[in-house]
Amino acid sequence: MMNRQKMLQDLEEVTVWDIIVIGGGATGLGAAVDAASRGYKTLLVEQEDFSKGTSSRSTKLVHGGVRYLAQGNIKLVREALRERGLLLKNAPHVCHNLSFIIPSFHWWQKWYYSIGLSMYDLLAGKLSLGKTKMLSKKTTMQLLPAISSKNLSGGVLYQDGQFDDSRLAINLAQTAAEQGAAILNYCKVIALTKTGTSISGVVVQDTISGRNYTLSSKAVINATGVFTDKVMEMDDAGHQPIVSPSQGVHIVVDEKFFPGKQALMIPKTDDGRVLFAVPWHDKVLLGTTDTPIKEISLEPRPLQEEIDFIIQHSNRYLSTRITYKDIRTVYVGLRPLIKVKGKKSTSILPRDHTTIVSKSGLVTITGGKWTTYRTMAKHAVDSAALACKLSKLPCVTDTLKIHGYTENTTSSDMLNVYGSDAEKINRLMNEQPLLKEKIHAALPYTKVTVVWAIQHEMAMTVEDVLARRTRALFLDATAAIEAAPLVAALMANLLQKSEDWQQQQVKAFEAIAQNYVIH
C-alpha cells in the first residue's frame, strides 16, 4: 500500500535501515524492489516525484539497442535483449511487443539490415520476440502508409518492446512497497552522515512539511542519474565529475501524420543518431536528438535547432508534412552518460552502466538505460551488500512479477487508459458514476484516474497527476493545461486543501507545462 503518512512514520520508527536508496527514477526504484525483495530493510527517498526526470521522458522503448549492435557493443546488446524479454514477461500489463520497420532506399540496404537484425534475433535466444523479415516496396508501403515512396526499395521488419515509462515507475514503487520497502517522494537528501570515515546514513528534508530527518543506514546507494555528481560531492568535496549529460528531445503529433501499428526506425541521421516514429497512446512520438549540455535542471528546455532537426528529418522520410503548429507536446530528457577520455560527441558515448564504491562506502550506480534497470539495480545492491558487509541474500527479481501483473491483456484499451489497476478502477467508477466524466475532451482520462492517483499512488501535485500518473502532459500539453483547474479541485477535495492551494497548484503546473508547448 502506497501511503505517504505511513511511510513517514517509518522514518521515526526504524532505528537503522539496511539500505537507503537516493533517487526515485528507474534505477533507484529497481534497487528498492531488489533490496526489499531480498529481505533488506529498505528506504527510498526522491527529491521530487517518482520518475520526475529522465525516467518519464524516454522514447518509450524496451529494446536491445540496434545502434549499439552497429557499434560492436555485443555485451550491452545481449544483456539488454535478455532484460527486454524478462520485462515483457514480468510486466505484460505495461510492456508489449512492437513491430519496427527500417525502410531501404538502396537495394543493398535491405540485405545489410537483415543480416544485422538476424544477429539481433540470435542474441535474444529463447527470449526473442519474433524473426526479422525482408519486405517488398509494396508491403513496406502498406505497413507504413505515411512513408515516402521516393527511392524506396523495400524494408526490413523486426521486433522490439514498447512500454509506458512513468507508469512502470509507479508500478515499481508499488512493488517495492508490497515487498516491505518505505518509498517517499518529495524527500530530499541534504547531507550524508558519517561515523569516522564511513557513510552511516543521510539527512533528508520532507519538502512538503519542511521537516528534517536524520536516518541511520548500513548502506547508501546513490541512484540519482544526472544528479549523480552532486551526491558524490556530498561524500567527497574533491570529487571530479563523471557524468557527461546529454539531452534528447521528442515531439508528439496526432496519429494522422503516421497511421498504422508499426514503428519506423531510421538507423542513421545527420548527427549519427537513430530517428524513431513510434505510435503511443493514439499519438506518435518523433525523435530523438543528442545534444551535450553543461547545466542540468529538473525542467530542461528544447533548443529550436533540435525541434527543427526532428521535423526536417521526419519530413524527409514521410509523405505527410509536419509543421510547428502540428506539435501537441515537446518533451526533453537528460541522459546521465559516463565521461570517456578523448570522446567529445555524446552520441558516441557508451550507454553501459557504471558502479562505483567510494572509500567511505557510498555505492553509486549511473549510466545505463530503462531496459537494463533490473541488472543495474542488482549490481548496485550486490555492491552495497559486499561493501557494507550485509548478510548475503540472493536476488529474486528475474522472476518477480511487477505490481499490476496480469496474464489477461485482452482489455488493452482499458489498461492503456487506467493502467495496472484497471479492474479496481472500473469498480470504483461503477460505485461512483460521476467519476466516469472526462477531465478534458481531448484526453482519454476520466476523473477516476485523479482519485485513484491520490488515494493509491502517492500523487501530491497536479503535475504528478497530469504528467506521470496519467500521461496527459506528454500527449497534449495545451489540453493538460486546460484540465489543470478541474484536477486541482478534485485533489483539493480529497486532500482537504484550500482554494489558495488549488490556485498555486494550477499556476505551478502551467509554468512547467509551458516548456512542453510550442509557441
Image (cartoon, rainbow, N blue to C red):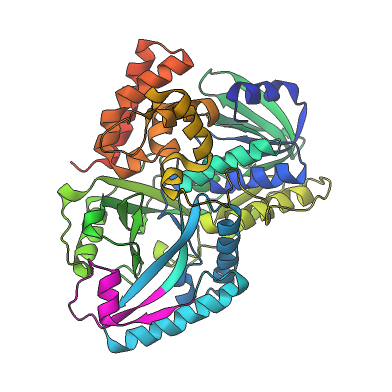
Give the quarter of the image for residue 135.
bottom left
Q: Measuring from the top left, give residue 95's x and y in whole percent.
A: 50, 54
Q: Is residue 437 above or below residue 225?
A: above
Query: Which residue sits at x=58%, y=63%?
Result: 85
Q: Does the magenta run of residues contain 146? A: yes
In front of the other: 457 or 69: 457
- Going by the image, does 147 lie left or right of 184? left
Residue under the image location 54 percent in, 70 percent down: 77
Relative image position of residue 462 (x, y in whole percent):
39, 27
Looking at the rendered image, the quarter that the N terminus falls into is top right
Q: Residue at x 44, y 28 (%)?
A: 429
Q: Confirm whether residue 104 shows in the render.
A: no
Relative to 376, residue 193 above or below:
above
**What x and y, as percent, mark residue 289?**
33, 59
Residue 384 visible somewhere in the drawing:
yes
In magenta stretch: residue 37? no
The answer to whether residue 156 is left or right of residue 65 is left
Magenta stretch: give its range: 131-157
Residue 225 left/right relative to 34: left
Percent position (x, y) of residue 359?
A: 72, 48
Q: Residue furthest front?
A: 430
- The C terminus - image quarter: top left
Q: Could you tell me how many numbered marks the image carries?
A: 0
